[in-house]
Image: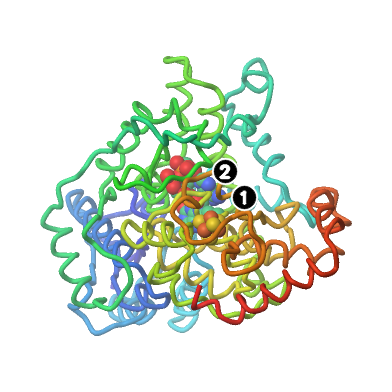
Amino acid sequence: MIRHLIIVLGDQLTLDNPALENLDPSCDHVLMAEVSAEGTHVWSHKARIALFLSAMRHFAQVLESKGIAVNYFKLGEHTFTQLNEVWLDQIKQLQPQKIIVCEPGEYRVLQALQACAQQTNTQLIVRDDTHFMCSQADFKRWAGQNKALRMEFFYRNMRKEHQVLIRDGQPEGGDWNYDHENRKAFGRQGPQDVPTMPVFEIDAITHEVFAEVEHHFSDHPGTLAHFCWPVTREQALEFLHAFIEHKLADFGAHQDAMWQGSAPHHAFLWHSLLSSSLNLKLLNPREVIQAAEQAYQQKQLSLASVEGFIRQILGWREFIRGVYWLDMPAMATSNHYGHQRQLPIWYWTANTQMNCMRQTIHQTMLYGYAHHIQRLMVTGMFGLLAEISPQQLEAWYLAVYVDAVEWVELPNVAGMALYANGGRFTSKPYVASGAYIKRMSNYCQGCRYKPEVKTGPQACPVTTLYWHFLIKHYATFVNNPRTSLMVKHVDKMSSEERMAINQHAQSLLTHLDAL
Ligand code: FAD
Ligand code: SF4
């Protein structure tokens, strides 16, 4: 019999984990488990599975080096397939007085923990996740009874509360948000002198994990050949320092731009690549924000870049987490437009003639990474325009990105990309024609379709489906001040043009797999 069974989940890999507070190594045990279901409940990318397993094994070593007893269940060394089977087994064997855990990142996992505690009649203590800078309770208070939530107002509160980029009570530089300065394309010459990130040697633990992933998940998407992600806090700190030193200064300007190139840095550009380290809790958002603010002050970096970066973490990341817990479980089944189409097979293979989709998915399969605009305005927007089931797309996003944990993946997909929750935190659906992708990337140059063509064999599917979407949802778009201008172009179309667009769109929608 032990005093406390402390469960450490795969994305809670920090010594600051509140579940570890007051741990007494003489009578408490930590439980960590790898089970196959966590890699298969969505068809996970090999790099995503490897990252979680390697980071977990490294963190277990850190705990053990501090004299903490860790009951670690390695994949392949036990017969349990689900997390709750391990928990039940351990609770029965060890008979703890209490189970202690930090708030999980998934509603499903919280439910499973509560069910185990109830089944074994053991007290479960779920401690607030202090990694986040806004607690669930504070977010709920801020949201109140408002039907529509806006990140911008939340973000201003967070800036004031945490005194980030605030001078004499006012926002640094006089404005809260410099997003309008952060939407530049690269121009013909493309990105120049993109800084590279540190490359880590694959150590024995990660080698072993790779072999096990290839063995247990051989048919899973993606590859391990280009694995480049931090698996320890030390490596995550190296990424952070490299970003602050070499990328932050130019982070803002081209934040939305995309580029097809031959080298990995064309996929990564000036983005920080810190999401997986933050989500596994190898990094704390406070230290990331502090490092960025300090660099701004010491090196006189561009305010648009630094504010733009800090807004992603202090604003978007915290907001998204708050809204997930506020709106679950309804968010997971939301489907505002009632879209039911199957996910095209090429979302897994990149084998499509649409170059924007081919490049973004190909890169995703290589690294388990795509940046925000690729996720929002390429794979996400196409999913919305092609009327694909939100639940199928949500499962895809949860599977293919190394930083995917449901609390962050689901609101971004359901809320931001697909408008599945009916505009709970976006004022309009994010839709655009191929002209947007042409402006923000070089994808259209290598494509058999033409972004400006709406119908016929050369028509860009993004463009056709965009106009089809506007025609179909004309009534709601015309009544929304944020979209009324967009549909003015529909007014100018003849009925023949509209009919031709609808016909072409229908033929695309019925043959999505062939695009
Ligand atoms: P940067 O561009 O360098 O941004 C800095 C940091 O800001 C990121 O590391 C991340 O922690 C945070 N951030 C930026 N945007 C967001 C956002 N919208 N929500 C939450 N945090 C944000 N992010 C995930 O961490 N996991 C996901 O599963 C995920 N799924 C997404 C799905 C869709 C459809 C969309 C549109 C966005 C998704 N994002 C997700 C947000 C964002 O795309 C990634 O955080 C970002 O691309 C990670 O790359 P980076 O670290 O280089 O980010
Ligand atoms: Fe994508 Fe259309 Fe451009 Fe091709 S032409 S890359 S399908 S936007």
Q: Is residue 198 left or right of residue 362?
A: left
Q: CA distance from mark 2 to mark 1?
A: 6 Å
Q: Vertical placement of 213 versus 252: above or below? A: below
Instruction: Identify the image quadrant of residue 272.
Output: top left
- Can you give x and y, in whole percent of width and height, for residue 385 in the image? 64, 66
Mark 2: secondary structure: helix
179 relative to 46 in the view: left or right: right
> Can residue 433 be spotted in the picture?
yes
* Residue 127 can be seen, yes or no: no
Please name the amino acid that badge 2 sits on.
Arg
Report the residue marked by disc 1: 435
Residue at (27%, 56%) from the top-left corner?
55
* Residue shown at the point (38%, 49%) measured from the top left: 281
Q: Residue at x 63, y 69 (%)?
A: 456
According to the picture, the residue beneath numbered tag 2 turns out to be 439
- Tell me, yes or no, whether the two marked residues, 2 and 1, touch with CB atoms within 8 Å: yes
Quadrant for residue 68, please give it.
bottom left
Q: Report helix, strand or loop for mark 1.
A: helix
Callout 1, which amino acid?
Ala
Considering depth in this image, is 440 or 172 the residue closer to the camera?
440
In the picture provided, is 376 more to the left or to the right than 270? Answer: right
Counting from the top left corner in percent of width and height, residue 150 is at: 72, 47
Decide: is 138 above or below 54: above
* Percent of width and height locating residue 216: 23, 78
Q: Nearer the viewer, residue 475 or 292?
A: 475
**Residue 474 pos. (x, y %):** 83, 63
